[in-house]
Image (cartoon, rainbow, N blue to C red):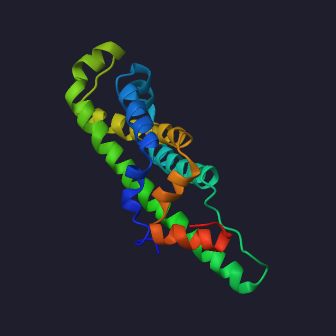
Amino acid sequence: MVLANRPWLLAAGLKSALVAALATGAIATIEPTVWLLAASLSGWRLAVATIASIAIVITWIVIDGGLWGRPEDGSAQARERSRLYNTSTLLTLTVGVVICYLALYAVNLARALFVLDPAVMGDSLGTSFGYVDLFVLTWFVASVATIGGALGTGLESDEAIRAAAYSKREEDRRARLAGEPA
């Protein structure tokens, strides 16, 4: 079910989210306060920021897009089917958002390597900065940009969110279950 939903196409289906994430990353990359924050974070705190940003986006998409399915009746079979569909939705979104996160990291790293000079950054902040610090900065910026992307999904219609999260066949099936016209 997850493969049928094509999670690698999630970002392309949520254009407003993608634009918001890229804009957030562009602004955060050149902001000296963000440089200081990134430099002050340990690896485990950056990992928590990554996991939290991904979880926030997934939760927001599920809530905003109304993607959480409820059993159509109280039968054990309906509950199991609902559990299966909700699990596939969460896995689809997790794979899709992780792919988006990695793409944001790559785009922001390219931007940082092109735009920022670690020596100038260090002079500005009164500390030493190296190219390794750009990788750490990009890690933090990818988490911040991911949250910015979540805000961008608020500009998407529920139909656009469902279309990005599900294959056409899955959308039709969900519409039939909900009694809506496909």
- Using the image as rendered, state which of residue 158 and residue 102 is in the foreground: 158
Residue shown at 64%/56% (left/top)?
66
Farthest residue toward the right?
74
Q: Position of residue 33 (x, y in %)?
A: 44, 21
Q: In the picture shown, does residue 39 fall above or below 166?
A: above
Which residue appears at 46% of the width and 42% of the height?
A: 17
Residue at 28% from the left image edge and 25% from the top image edge:
129
Q: Is residue 42 visible?
A: no
x, y percentage for residue 59?
Answer: 59, 53
In the image, residue 18 sits, relative to residue 131, either above or below, namely: below
Seen in the picture, residue 141 relative to 102 is either above or below; the reply is: above
Q: Position of residue 164 (x, y in %)?
A: 46, 56
Q: Residue furthest front?
A: 181
Figure quadrant of residue 82: bottom right
Q: Residue at x 29, y 33 (%)?
A: 134
The image quadrant where one finds the C terminus is: bottom right
Q: Nearer the viewer, residue 81 or 178?
A: 178
Position in image of residue 40 (x %, y %): 44, 31
How many marks the image carries: the answer is 0
Residue 123 in view, yes or no: yes
Q: Quadrant of residue 3?
A: bottom left
Closer to the camera in the image, 120 or 106: 106
